[in-house]
Amino acid sequence: MKKMEVERHSVFTRVVHWSIAITGIILGLTGLEIGGHYGVRFLGDNVTSTHVYVGIVFGVLWVLFTYYMLTKEWKWVGLHRVAYSLRFLWAETKAWFGGPHIEDPRAYDPKKGDYVEKIMPTQVMVWWGYWILAVIIGFTGLAMYFKDFFAWVFDIGSAIGPIFGAESGYAFVRGVHLLFMYLFAVVLIMHMYAVLIFGVLKSMITGKREEKVAE
């Protein structure tokens, strides 16, 4: 199999990616401390303000990353590829249980100077999962901090919260915030596993990767 080294990720992509990772970890630790979960002690008295400020930075980074993905990577992660991603996931799942091997579709065409396929198709769902979770976490976080401005959110929470055992609108919003933080962590763990399995960790550090040359 012929391979060649190509630039997979720009400096911008790498800086924003790792900045999101670092701020996300800080948000997770400070959020657990604010909620009094698992005995986490990270910053003490400054934990709430740090959580809010880092959350704002996290949000700005996601806006930048979303703009980049929409303008530069849409053909790889666009909504039009979700169905393809699901079909690939199903084929990959069957392969795990003894089905036919799934060939890595990633390849680079040196004549065109572009990828034939840049990502594992399941990454489409990972991207959208991250994005939806980040939006919900960010929105509920802002609502809890700016309670007066988002009073209508707590009214909605008060109406539907009892269905889920929440004692108040605030408790419901806080529960949603925590739940989606856990879901974000689950997606993160799956993402880390896939990065190692599919050999793309180094490229997010150096920007380059040995890619299969399209025939």
Image (cartoon, rainbow, N blue to C red):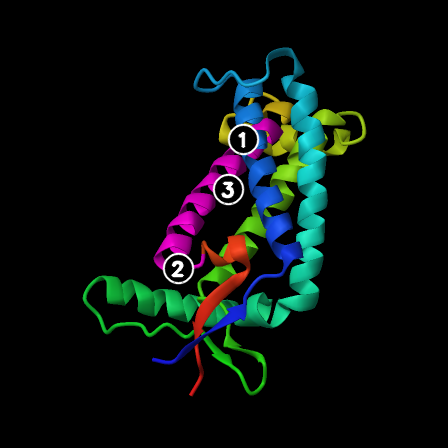
Q: Residues within 10 Å of mark 2 (few under 14, many from 20)?
A: few
Nearer the observer: mark 1 or 3; the answer is 1
- The mark that comes first in sequence, 2 or 3, is 3
Q: Which residue is mark 1?
A: 28
In this rendering, the answer to whether 158 lies above or below 22 is above
Q: CA distance from mark 1 to mark 3?
A: 10 Å
In the image, is 93 to the left or to the right of 8? left
Residue shown at 44% from the left, 63% from the top: 122
Q: Quadrant of residue 186?
A: top left
Q: Nearer the viewer, mark 1 or mark 2?
A: 2
> In this picture, is 147 found above or below 137?
above
- Magenta-span inclusion, residue 179: yes
Mark 2 sits on what residue? Answer: 199
141 lies left or right of 83: right
At label 2, which amino acid type do we have?
Gly
Of marks 2 and 3, the one in the foreground: 2
| Residue drawn at the location 47% of the way across and 65% of the way down | 209
- Return the residue at label 3: 184
The answer to whether residue 107 is seen in the rendering is yes
The C terminus sits in image quarter: bottom left
Q: Measure the alpha-carbon separation of dots 1 and 2.
A: 26 Å
Please state which amino acid type lies under the numbered disc 1: Gly
Q: Which label number is shown at residue 36?
A: none
Which residues are drawn in magenta? 173-200
